[in-house]
């Protein structure tokens, strides 16, 4: 009996130790599970209540070339991508989120004769095709766009004081707008020719039966609505330095320049590369003048670049950091200086952070998220407008009715002269003309 009792006491100690271990394991698992649930709950809360919506997306190819920016607000479509050795085709589809109230000012007078118009439903489809040289410089860029929407036309009884009751729906029209731009660049041994053609058809409904029907128009036999051409003459001035002259023509208006619009040089300097050019100063009277000066420097030794633009009586100075293992440059500081008043200077600094393999940075007072994709790079732009779900989304009033009202026109300059630096892009980029001239200096 005494032996049995000693064994029982000894086994009791073992059982108690095992129960304590088991209890500790259960406690740890419970704590981990609770923390996990809390973290998931916090993440979901932040995603739903604190993370602002994606306002736009910007798409770049694998070589850092700007391709396209969201045509409509609150749209970040996954593109359909077709890649070959020397070309890239990306197709995007967008939804228009009507405001549900207010009138967008797209007067129907020219089409239906009615005074007020509202657009609540619509969509756009865009196809971008680029072709490259052997050095991955874009030599052919073609954007095709079709935007469809239902336009509700109203009359207004000015005698009714209640705003919401003063309007009467009198007509609904299916509208389809077509737009196309082609930019072709030919690189020669002594000159570069860059030609841009714009085509458009507005208010057309032929061949479109619904807002989800997106047949592209064939402009091959049409004369362009507007056409511009840059002729760039360049020559080797000294070792690794090329001087150039820009001539701007408007063939669609039978206008051809004799005097150069810009003159400058591209050089491979000790610390990297430099582009400098300016146009002649034009006196506008009353101590005002119009002049433009550009100075862009890539410092290879410290992985940074800078860009200075002088326009009228103002100077903009930008500093960039070049992201490692990419062809992309992020803005880190921007300075505005008044040349009339040296005390009028504004400096803005922007942080670039890396977290979990993503790059965060600021652009135009908005937060951007950059990450790699199968086709290149995608930038998501987030705003702070307090919208939490799709039911609250509201496109900019009337934006679908304005042909190519997205960022592409601001960045590449579809409706005016060819842009030489893509200043309005989240990532700094510049015209293929300069990419080619820089290549010559290597």
Image (cartoon, rainbow, N blue to C red):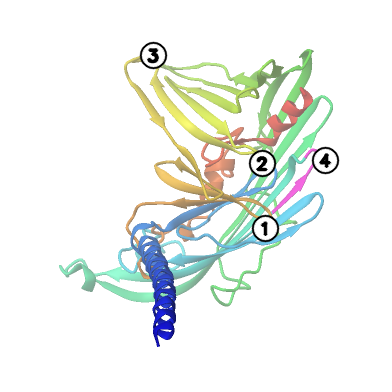
Q: Nearer the viewer, residue 152 or 313?
A: 313
> What residue is pinned by disc 4?
134
Label 4 or label 3, whichever lies nearer to me, is 4
**Residue 337 rendering spot, x and y as whole percentages:** 40, 21
Q: Nearer the viewer, mark 1 or mark 3?
A: 1
For disc 2, the marked residue is 252
Q: The residue tagged with tag 3: helix, strand or loop?
A: loop
Report the quarter where the N terminus lies.
bottom left
Q: Residue furthest top?
A: 238
Distance CA(mark 4)–CA(mark 3)? 49 Å
In the image, the segment drawn in magenta is: 129-135
Residue under label 3, please give it: 287
Mark 4 or mark 2, which is nearer to you? 4
Is 141 displayed left or right of 189 in the figure?
A: left
Please tell me whether mark 2 sits on a helix, a strand or a loop: helix
Q: Position of residue 233 (x, y in %)?
A: 75, 23
Residue at mark 1 to residue at mark 4: CA–CA distance: 20 Å
- Left of 393 or right of it: where is 213? right
């Amino acid at each position: 009996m005494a032996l049995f009792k000693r064994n029982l006491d000894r086994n009791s100690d073992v059982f108690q130790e095992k129960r304590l271990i088991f209890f500790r394991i259960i406690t740890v698992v419970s704590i981990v599970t609770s923390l996990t649930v809390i973290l998931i709950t916090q993440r979901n809360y932040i995603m739903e209540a604190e993370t602002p919506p994606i306002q736009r997306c910007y798409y770049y190819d694998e070589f850092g070339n700007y391709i396209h920016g969201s045509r409509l607000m609150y749209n970040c479509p996954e593109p359909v991508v077709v890649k070959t050795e020397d070309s890239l085709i990306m197709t995007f589809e967008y939804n228009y989120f009507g405001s549900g109230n207010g009138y967008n000012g797209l007067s129907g007078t020219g089409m239906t004769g009615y005074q007020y118009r509202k657009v609540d439903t619509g969509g756009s489809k865009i196809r971008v095709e680029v072709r490259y040289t052997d050095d991955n410089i874009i030599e052919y860029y073609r954007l095709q766009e079709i935007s469809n929407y239902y336009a509700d036309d109203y009359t207004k009884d000015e005698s009714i004081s209640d705003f919401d009751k003063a309007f009467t729906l009198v007509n609904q029209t299916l509208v389809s707008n077509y737009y196309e731009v082609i930019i072709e660049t030919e690189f020669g041994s002594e000159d570069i020719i860059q030609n841009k053609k714009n085509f458009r058809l507005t208010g057309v409904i032929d061949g479109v039966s619904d807002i989800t029907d997106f047949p592209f128009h064939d402009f091959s036999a049409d004369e362009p609505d507007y056409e511009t051409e840059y002729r760039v003459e360049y020559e080797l001035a000294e070792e690794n330095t090329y001087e150039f002259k820009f001539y701007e023509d408007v063939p669609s208006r039978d206008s051809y320049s004799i005097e150069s619009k810009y003159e400058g040089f591209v050089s491979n300097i000790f610390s990297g590369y430099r582009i400098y050019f300016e146009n002649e100063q034009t006196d506008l009277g009353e101590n005002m003048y119009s002049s433009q000066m550009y100075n862009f420097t890539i410092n290879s030794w410290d992985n940074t670049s800078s860009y200075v633009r002088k326009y009228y009586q103002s100077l903009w100075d930008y500093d960039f950091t070049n992201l490692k293992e990419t062809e992309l440059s992020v803005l880190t500081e921007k300075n505005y200086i008044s040349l009339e008043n040296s005390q009028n200077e504004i400096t803005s600094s922007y942080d670039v952070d890396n977290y979990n393999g993503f790059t965060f940075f600021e652009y135009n007072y908005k937060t951007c998220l950059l990450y790699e994709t199968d086709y290149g790079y995608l930038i998501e732009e987030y705003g702070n407008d307090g919208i939490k779900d799709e039911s609250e989304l509201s496109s900019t009033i009337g934006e679908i009715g304005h042909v190519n009202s997205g960022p592409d026109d601001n960045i590449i300059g579809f409706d005016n002269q060819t842009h030489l630096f893509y200043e309005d892009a989240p990532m700094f980029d510049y015209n293929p003309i300069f990419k080619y001239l820089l290549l010559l200096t290597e």
